[in-house]
Amino acid sequence: MRQVTLPIHNTKDGLPSFESYSPPNCSIYVTTKQMPNTHLQHPEDTVLTGDLRALRDLYGKGHVSLKIDGAPAVVWGHYQGKFFVCTKAAFNKKKVRLCHNTQDVHTYFGHQEDVADMLFLMLKYIPRDEFPGVYQGDFMGFGRTQTFKTNTLTYVFPEVIQQKLVIAPHTYYNVDGKLSEAVAEPLTEILTDTPHIKWVQPSVDFVHLGLNPPPIKRSKVQFMSDKESFVAQQQINALVKSGQEIDDRDLHWILGDIYLTNLYQMVTEIKEDLMETMIVTDSPRCFLPDGTEVVGEGFVFHSERGRSYKLVDRPVFSFTNFTQGKFN
């Protein structure tokens, strides 16, 4: 693995000085923590504005789940005493479209035949007494087959799934007020399959990086504003979409600062080192469109400090998703 050198300093964050990053000695550790219901970001993207919490989070304890490349996202459970099913529209700040009955499905999703069929079956077959709160997962497909593809990746189970619906649940929400303000936490409960619903919940163990994260001399780095960071992320995604490697020269041209470039690459390598330790069990086989077998889309890292990040091999999966998936 290539080393990335950054300036030595004594940081206000209380982190030890360093000259270069290399993988530390490791130990196994898994835990859980709540996090707000926000859009997941790549950890390397979060540091562009000077928010270095991702560094501490990746070196800390956490819970990891496998990202399932399903679509659409589905939400179900009880809210204000009533059972509902929905897509991510459940979290809309305006025009919340909760489906309590078949008429609601016709009204809100009748123009989307496959989505409506999915919601009809969810209303009919999800055991309501087993879900007192609000849950979210990814729809993998309708059953009676062993091969599923709803977006980019193809999943192959060892045998034909006899249930009518296949769903990968991953999140539980604590709701104290509006659904749009719900607080999420990773779903660690193992759901029991029913005669009509197959729950897909791969297990992930990982090697905790341990030690302390490398410090950053903030005064040397020219961080970006939120607007500049947004533009830079668009340019980086354009590179990924074109199939180009995100090398130091191109990244320096986008970010405009060598120290910020080194920091970005360092966090990327820390992320990749962590991903290499992931051990996945109870997951169907997973294939890219070209037939290459992969572990999956990536992972979601839920830090003990209440923040979550998506850990994705961007040159592989993000490129495939941009060019052959729902973003194409």
Image (cartoon, grey):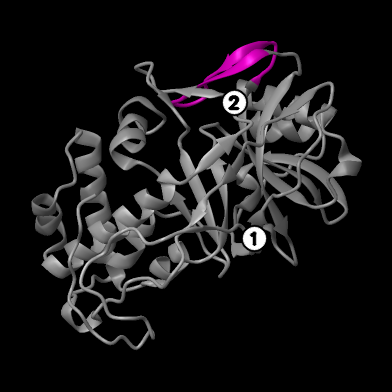
Instruction: Look at label 2 and name its amino acid.
Output: Gln
- Magenta segment: does it hold 141? no
**Residue located at (82% from left, 33% from top):** 126
Quadrant in the rendering for residue 220: bottom left
> Residue 251 bears which disc, if any?
none
Q: Is residue 298 above or below residue 235?
A: above
Residue 184's x, y, as percent?
65, 58
In the rendered structure, which amino acid carries the disc numbered 1?
Answer: Thr
Q: Using the image, determine if residue 298 lies above or below residue 176.
A: above
Is 61 or 232 nearer to us in this picture? 61
- Say what secondary structure mark 1 lies in: loop
Residue farthest toward the right in the current orientation of the protein: 129
Instruction: Measuring from the top left, give residue 172's x and y in whole percent.
Output: 70, 52
Label 1 packing within 10 angstroms: few (<14), some (14-19), many (20+) = some
Q: CA distance from mark 1 to mark 2?
A: 36 Å
Residue 112 x %, y %? 59, 25
Residue 310 vs residue 44: left or right?
Answer: right
Residue located at (8% from left, 52% from top): 249
For residue 20, what is the image quadrant? bottom left
On the image, numbered disc 1 is attached to which residue? 32
Magenta stretch?
142-159
Of badges 1 and 2, the one in the foreground is: 1
Q: Name the mark on residue 112.
A: 2
Instruction: Name the side, left or right, on which 174 lies relative to 64.
Output: right
Point out residue 312 in the picture as x, y percentages from the top left corner.
40, 44
Up-down: is 123 above or below 61?
above
